[in-house]
Amino acid sequence: EKVVGSKRFALSSLIMSSNAFLIPARFMATIGHFVACVGAAYTIENNVYASMSAQPHLKEINYANQIANWAIIMSYLCFSLDFVGLFSGFSMFSASKNAFQCAIHVTGGIMMCWFITYTWRWEMLWIIVCLTNIPTAFVEIAPLVDIFVLKTVPY
């Protein structure tokens, strides 16, 4: 317990107050990043053409489109794990996981918007996915492994 002025604050109330704003912030950051990824899926052809030479072969264009689409699919798979973790509650009440998810998803959303706006090379999409989607998916997999494989109590 902590006394500030005439009010007493328990440590648990401070943790609950951090979750009170981290959970909605995590939801908004995840949705924003997801919307930016959907936007990138619609503009990926522009990024592919921007990264090609003046006279690209059809084979090069098809290869680049295929690899870029796999990056988008990977991001969607990672988002599905993020949403399962968020809505199922396996990691929802962990303040550190929520803060990590917020920071990474905000960064990912900004990077994805820059990818769309400045027509970055399609290879950058894999870098963005590897830096912002895959780590958040691993953070969501960890509680699932703890609960269902190692049989631990989450909270």
Image (cartoon, rainbow, N blue to C red):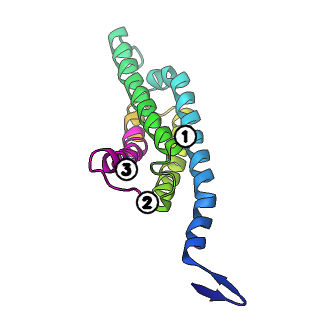
Q: Which residue occupies 56% across, 50% down? A: 26
Disc 2 residue crowd, few under 14, some 14–19, many 20+, Cα 10 Å: few
Query: Is the C-beta separation of discs 3 and 1 under 8 Å?
Result: no
Residue 96 within the segment the image draws in magenta: no
Q: Is residue 36 positioned above or below 49 on the image?
A: below
Q: Tell which residue pokes out farthest to the right in this image.
A: 6
Q: Which residue occupies 42% across, 46% down? A: 136
Q: Is residue 42 positioned above or below 17 on the image?
A: above
The residue wearing badge 3 is: 143
The residue wearing badge 1 is: 33
Whether residue 123 is visible, yes or no, is: yes
Residue 88 position, x and y percent, is 50, 42
Q: Amino acid at mark 3?
A: Pro
Secondary structure found at label 2: loop
Q: Is residue 23 positioned above or below 69 on the image?
A: below
Cα distance between the residues tagged 3 and 1: 22 Å
Disc 1 residue crowd, few under 14, some 14–19, many 20+, Cα 10 Å: many
Q: Is residue 80 positioned above or below 137 on the image?
A: above
The residue wearing badge 2 is: 155
Q: Amino acid at mark 1?
A: His
Secondary structure found at label 1: helix
Secondary structure found at label 3: helix
Viewer-closest of 51 and 140: 140
Q: Nearer the viewer, mark 2 or mark 1?
A: 2
| Image quadrant in which the C terminus is located | bottom left
Residues rendered magenta in the picture? 129-155
